[in-house]
């Protein structure tokens, strides 16, 4: 059984952008612990989402932690800008960040929390040397680039192995999962050791509304 309750991080990629501020407020009232912001550049991933002006704008509607998931090439050049736009936490991908230790120090020097994301094909070993410096490891449970994809079941074992690695090193670092998370898949990853659940479609795409959708996911892991 999970040792602690999971935290919900709604991904605004699936929100209705015509009423984005309102959707974020609703997610907050429905129990969101943080807002997950997916930035895509059409290079690192085959899709473009939104960037700095959007973050600056939504920063006015909530005090919730903004977690910015950078799916962009050359993230180092834009870390300052994303930090100043209102991010509280910045997640970079290990696959396109060659000097990961330097990047982590850069993010931390700005007073921000730092996470590293791993694509489904990327082994845990790539974060082994720097894991103690992180606040969070994001296990991608789909290949990044699009919302609404099917959860990859083989990632459950990866979450388990990461949990074991953290326990062995006696580290209290958040394990986050992202992609295809809903009330059916959430219990699998929480059981495996995940603490933070990113969910886009399952929250903003639920016909019964953001409140009922959030409750369904949180109840599934209670
Ligand atoms: C995928 C993004 C996810 C995405 C999740 O590249 O990193 O955060 O928004 O969307 P769902 O929950 O719809 O799979
Ligand atoms: Zn994401």
Image: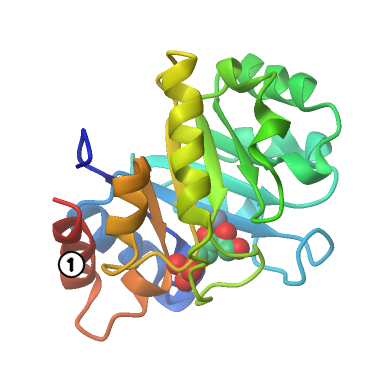
Residue 87 in view here: no
Above or below, 122 against 127 in this view is below
Q: Considering depth in this image, is 221 or 163 the residue closer to the camera?
A: 163
Secondary-structure class at tag 1: helix
Q: Position of residue 23 (x, y in %)?
A: 33, 67
Answer with the quadrant where ligand 2 appears in the image: bottom right
Q: Position of residue 57 (x, y in %)?
A: 51, 53
Above or below, 6 against 199 in this view is above
Residue linked to disc 1: 216
Tell me which residue sits at (55%, 25%) in the image: 112
Quarter of the figure with residue 41 = bottom right
Q: Classify mark 1: residues with Cα within 10 Å, few (<14), some (14-19) or many (20+).
A: some
Q: Position of residue 84 (x, y in %)?
A: 62, 33
Tell me which residue sits at (36%, 45%) in the image: 192
- Is the CB atom of the residue marked by disc 1 within 8 angstroms of ligand 1's nearest atom? no
Tell me which residue sits at (18%, 61%) in the image: 220
Q: Considering depth in this image, is 41 or 134 the residue closer to the camera?
A: 134
Q: Considering depth in this image, is 50 or 197 the residue closer to the camera?
A: 197
Quarter of the figure with residue 110 = top right
Quarter of the figure with residue 146 = bottom right
Q: Residue furthest bottom?
A: 207
């Amino acid at each position: 059984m999970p040792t602690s309750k999971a935290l919900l991080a709604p991904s605004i990629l699936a929100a209705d952008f015509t009423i984005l501020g309102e959707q974020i407020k609703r997610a907050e009232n429905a129990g969101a612990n943080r807002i997950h912001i997916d930035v895509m550049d059409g290079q690192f991933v085959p899709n473009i989402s939104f960037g700095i002006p959007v973050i600056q704008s939504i920063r006015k509607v909530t005090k919730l932690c903004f977690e910015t998931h950078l799916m962009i090439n050359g993230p180092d050049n834009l870390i300052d800008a994303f930090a100043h736009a209102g991010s509280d936490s910045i997640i970079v991908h290990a696959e396109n960040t060659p000097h990961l230790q330097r990047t982590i120090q850069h993010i931390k020097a700005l007073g921000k929390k730092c996470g590293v994301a791993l694509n489904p094909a990327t082994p845990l070993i790539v974060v082994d040397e720097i894991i103690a410096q992180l606040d969070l490891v994001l296990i991608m449970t789909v290949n990044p680039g699009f919302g609404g994809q099917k959860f990859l079941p083989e990632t459950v074992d990866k979450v388990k192995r990461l949990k074991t690695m953290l326990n062995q090193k006696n580290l209290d670092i958040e394990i986050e999962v992202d992609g295809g998370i809903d009330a059916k898949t959430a219990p699998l990853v929480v059981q495996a050791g995940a603490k933070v659940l990113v969910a886009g479609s399952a929250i903003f795409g639920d016909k019964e509304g953001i409140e009922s959708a959030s409750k369904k996911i949180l109840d599934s892991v209670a």
